[in-house]
Image: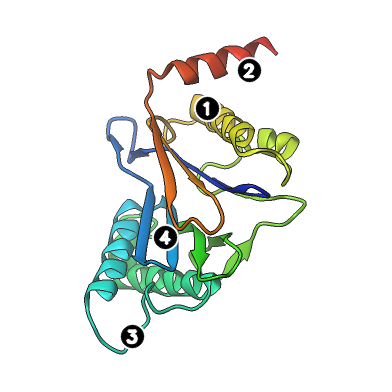
Amino acid sequence: LAMRLDGGRVFLSDTRTNAGVDNVGTYRKMHVIAPAPDRLFVLESAGNLATTQQVLDRIRQDLDTPGDHVSLATVTHLFDAALYVGRLSRQVVVEHQAALSSVGADATATFILGGQVGDEEPDILLVYPEGNYIRASDERPFLQIGETKYGKFMLELAVTSHVDMITATKIALGSMMTTASANLSVGPPYDIGLYRPGSMVLEELRVEADSPLLGRLQELWHKH
């Protein structure tokens, strides 16, 4: 999930993937890309892990290969970057769709893209598998991907754009823990990213499963 707040942007991802109860793994779902001093991108992913990894490889390949092509180093707006990620995702899905469909697998992935390009206001965008995107709104200043139905109520009740970033991070963790308690495909460690406008640097923190912070938050949620 990601939040667009007056004080900055908050990103939170879990790290669990699963292909059945006996095939659970841990993979990072928050990826930070800083291809130039005037831009920073945070890409969060949900859905098919192979599609996500190939999209990330294509992004890196475009950045590492000189030439007359679009990359995260050449886009002039954050929404251009969202459309670029959407195009890559669609291309990867088309490439493997026939094979995956034959075994009943879903090749699609969904992304949250956040960050800042140049002097523009930082933002967060949700990139759909179809390649288009939406922004967070002032009335609902957060975006979710993946298993959204369990922890969504907590965000809707508590998140407003003027809430401070520390409180927002606690709300985000509470929402994620609620989701994890109800769904096998969500779980710690959790990756947190805090972005303050104009900094071009993401403050990162990993919260492990045995973190006293998670225990204290869970205790407070249950009590109140």
What type is the residue that disc 2 sits on?
Answer: Trp
Label 1 or label 4, whichever lies nearer to me, is 1
Residue hosting label 2: 221
What type is the residue that disc 1 sits on?
Answer: Met
C-alpha gap between disc 1 and disc 2: 10 Å
Circle 4: element type: loop
Circle 1: element type: helix
Give me the residue at 52% from left, 70% from top. 78
Of callouts 1 and 2, which one flags the residue occurring earlier in the amino acid sequence? 1
Mark 1 vs 4: CB contact within 8 A: no
What type is the residue that disc 3 sits on?
Answer: His
Mark 1 vs 2: CB contact within 8 A: yes
C-alpha gap between disc 3 and disc 2: 49 Å
Q: Is residue 85 above or below residue 202?
A: below
Label 3 or label 1, whichever lies nearer to me, is 3
Residue 177, labelled with which disc?
A: 1
Closer to us: 117 or 20: 117
Structural crowding at the residue carrying mark 3, measured as other residues with C-alpha within 10 Å and reported as few (<14), some (14–19) or many (≥20): few
Give me the residue at 32% from left, 41% from top. 19
Residue 108, labelled with which disc?
A: 4
C-alpha gap between disc 1 and disc 4: 25 Å
C-alpha gap between disc 3 and disc 1: 41 Å
Of callouts 3 and 4, which one flags the residue occurring earlier in the amino acid sequence? 3
Q: Is residue 161 above or below residue 210?
A: below
C-alpha gap between disc 3 and disc 4: 24 Å
